[in-house]
Amino acid sequence: MKEFSKILALVAIISFSSCQKNKKNETSMNFGEAHPNQIVEKTLVLNFNDESKADSNSFVEFSYLNEDGSLPNNIVYTINGENITGNKLKFYAYTFQNKNSEVKIGIKFPKGTQEKEYIGKFVLTAASPDLQQNIYQGTNKIKSSVGETLGKWNVIYTDPIPLWIKITAGISSILLAIVLLFYILRRPNMPLGPKTFQRGMLSFLDGNTTSVSLENLQKYDISKTLGIEEGLLLEPFDKLYQRKKQRFARLKNNSSSLDIKVIYNGIEEAVGVNQELYNLDDIKIKTIDNKIYTLSYSNNKIKRF
């Protein structure tokens, strides 16, 4: 802000420091931004002459008012950091004997005050009789009178979220995002999650077991279902097929005595340790005691050509 001193001569000199001057020669006191219970200040310079200082009754009084002349609400005013009662600033000349002429005038807002910009006028509301006719405004000594607006004041009140809350909220948001991302990645068929068949149906053609949907299963134990030698499983398996990765159902045979064949298009193909299944493949299982089981796999997304 441009440095400016506004001077009032009362057979004494009063000036506002660090304020802007408008075209009407009025002082504009911009207090900036204030937070709850924070004092924002401007410097008022009161250079009373010796005659005024010798008179214990010589004084000047200023008031903060709204633009419409009403009394501001929910604002605490200060002089040199100390709260005052009301909106009036009264200064006696004798109190400035052998004392610095600068006075800090401030504004403070209690917590809970409405957040907005407060604008008003700074008025010379009273002066002792000996000074009433000797008040001059500005370095060029323009005469001022009691009741005259000497300047404008404004301040923006905000109640920001405390830094520690922002940091806590930020860290919590990051942690929540990490947990959510980890949860998503751990879901079935995600990079960190288990594989499922996603689709496909396994039917038991002997009619003793109902058909099984493989969609949400991570594996299927055929041996356990049929009550035969352990080691015959159906597992999901990714394979490049038709120029894209597709999810197959793969027979995994770790048994020692089961004779397993896959039948498709009239062809019987013996199954080794692993065998991928295609749509409408039949699975023929022969046990060591010559029991035969026939199963059928269907998945119209995986077809033989």
Image: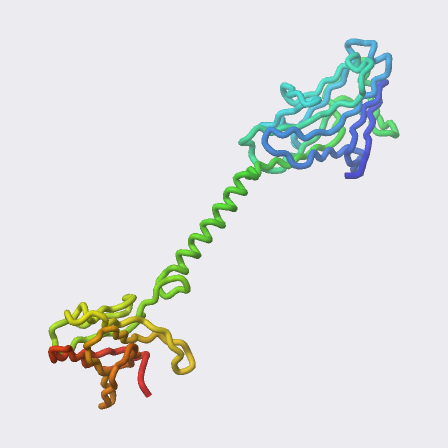
* Residue ID at (55%, 37%): 162
Q: Is residue 66 left or right of residue 217?
A: right
Judge by depth and name the residue closer to the eye, 91 or 11.
91
Q: In which quadrant of the rendered view does residue 77 lie? A: top right
Name the image quarter holding the N terminus: top right
* Residue ID at (49%, 50%): 174
Q: Is residue 168 left or right of residue 16?
A: left
Q: Is residue 254 left or right of residue 120?
A: left
Q: In which quadrant of the rendered view does residue 70 lie? A: top right
Q: Is residue 248 left or right of residue 51?
A: left
Q: In which quadrant of the rendered view does residue 266 lie? A: bottom left
Judge by depth and name the residue closer to the eye, 280 or 4.
280
Q: Is residue 73 visible?
A: no
Colour option used: rainbow
Judge by depth and name the residue closer to the eye, 33 or 155.
33
Q: How many marks?
A: 0
**Does residue 241 lie above or below 170 as drawn?**
below
Farthest residue to the front: give it. 256
**Does residue 201 lie above or below 177 as drawn?**
below
Farthest residue to the bottom: give it. 266
Residue 183 picture location, percent across and down: 39, 56
Residue 282 picture location, percent across and down: 21, 82
